[in-house]
Image (spheres, rainbow, N blue to C red):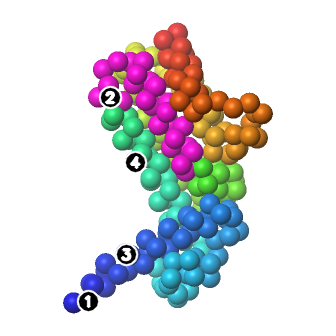
Amino acid sequence: MRTPLQARSESSADRMLDAALTLLADGGLRAVTVAAVAREAGTSNGSLYHRFGDRGGLLLAAQDRALGQIEAATARAFARADAEPDDDRALAMLAREALAIFGTHRAALRTFLVEAAGQPEFEARTVRSSHLLATTVTDWLRTRFDARDEDAEAAYRLLFALGAAQALFDDAQVSPGRTDPDRFADAVARAVGAVVRA
């Protein structure tokens, strides 16, 4: 029995998006060419053009997938934190997960926050995602800790700055010293806690 055409098409599109994200991780925007994606995905150039229109359409779809994965991971992290009755443990969980999310998606973040900065076709989706994350974090901090708006916003910016630094720089580029990831996450949680409990 043959796989239905729609399922094959979606599978091919998924392979092309996965290939684009792999190439982004390996070499940034310049590495993502139609030929390279088709080769990596085991499809044809024509298939890519048919599905995404052109390289730009493929990159926008890859950006949407990467940012969607970050948004979904963030939503899952906050759902788990909501289930934790202890505020300090909930903050520690979120700090660990936020840093892990930025670390896991560092290539996509580096690409779309830095390489694609100033390119209008990418800017709107990046801003929408950042604002969604900001709203998720600040609403949770206001609800959970009765944080003032400006404190919740400052805490989000602290988390975003640390996460972005983790996405943009290797640990050895930041400092010659080493820190245990769990201890660092605990320190971040304490810092966020201090800000929202001010």
Of the residues under marks 4 and 1, which one precedes in the sequence? 1
Above or below: residue 105 compared with residue 85: below
Q: Identify residue type, mark 4.
A: Ala
* Residue kind at label 3, given as amino acid type: Glu
Kindly state the secondary structure of the residue where label 1 is placed. Answer: loop
Q: Which residues are magenta?
A: 81-105
Residue under label 3: 10
Left or right side of 75 for 35: right
Say whether disc 1 or disc 2 marks the residue closer to the N-terminus: 1
* Residue that label 2 marks: 82
Q: Considering the image in quadrants, where does the N terminus appear?
A: bottom left
Residues packed near mark 4 inside 10 Å, few (<14), some (14 to 19) or many (20 plus): few
Mark 1: amino acid: Arg
| Residue assigned mark 4 | 72
Q: Is 57 in front, or is 171?
A: 171
Measured as percent of width and height from the top left, residue 122 is found at 60, 58
